[in-house]
Amino acid sequence: MKQNQSIRILVADDHTLFRQGVIRLLKDNKKVIVIGEAKNGSELIARYFNLMPDIILVDISMPEVSGIEAVERILEKDPYAKSIFMSMDDGEEYVYKVLKTGGCGLVNKNIMDEELYYAIEKVYRGEKYFGGKWTEGSLNQLLNDYEANHKGNSKFDETKLNFREEQVLNLIVEGMKSKEIADNLNLSKKSIDYYRSTLLRKLEFNTQAELIKFGINYFNIKREKQI
């Protein structure tokens, strides 16, 4: 970063209190400047091309268009766009999802301010940041493990999901909670909980982490077959 040159940030999160909190936090650092904000994915896409920030700081799950989908659309037009995703869950399945999307980093929403500054500066320099435990080598290994897993697992070809199951699974992968999915699909929370349990039983999984990992690979394979 050039001396006296601020890193221009666009913050996107559908929760106003959290978004405003991040903006206030960033204002305490003289190395960065918040040039805009967005409350959903559609707004993020429009604001990005109007403002052309150095880095997008974006919630992984947002209404209308998720953070993941918004960044994918942005990268289609600007392959040099840099993004750091924010999520309450930063497990390896989300690290993989962000890497496959083209994101440069993933931070937990409970991150300390100094670590957030560090992540921003690292991504601005062209590096990746997914937390202290992730190195370039371990990130590459994660990608290789996930790719090898879905290529060698017949479950993806054997599994038949109906339209609604795919909708729910996709939103689970995007990081949405049952209430958010219910609002998005105009269904009751009880219905979404039913679909969650049905998916776990149908796919013979015991945990949500297994379901998310499956979903990420399921939709990656589906996209590959459409190309």
Image: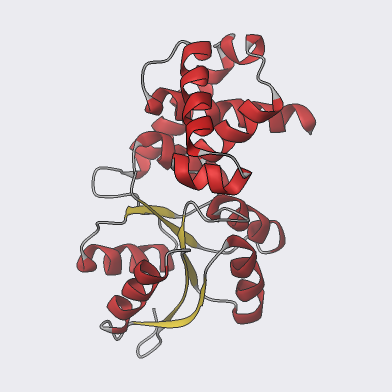
Q: Is residue 115 left or right of residue 95?
A: left
Residue at x 57% of width, y 64% of height:
81
Where is residue 45? Give x, y as percent: 64, 67
Where is residue 52? Give x, y as percent: 59, 77
- Can the viewer see residue 99? no
Q: Is residue 101 above or below residue 116?
A: above
Q: Is residue 172 left or right of residue 157?
A: left
Identify which residue, 198 or 27, lies in the foreground. Answer: 198
Residue at x 66% of width, y 64% of height:
78
Image quarter of residue 123: bottom left
Q: Residue furthest right?
A: 227
The C terminus: image quadrant: top right
Q: Is residue 133 above or below residue 51?
A: above
Q: Is residue 57 above or below residue 47?
A: above
How many marks on residues?
0
Residue at x 29% of width, y 86% of height:
30
Q: Is residue 174 left or right of residue 209?
A: right
The N terminus: image quadrant: bottom left
- Can the viewer see residue 130? yes
Where is residue 137? Give x, y as percent: 35, 38
Type of colouring: secondary structure
Q: Residue furthest bottom?
A: 4
Image quarter of residue 15: bottom left
Identify which residue, 84 or 148, lies in the foreground. Answer: 84
Where is residue 112? Give x, y as percent: 20, 63
Image quarter of residue 105: bottom left
Residue at x 63% of width, y 34% of height:
167
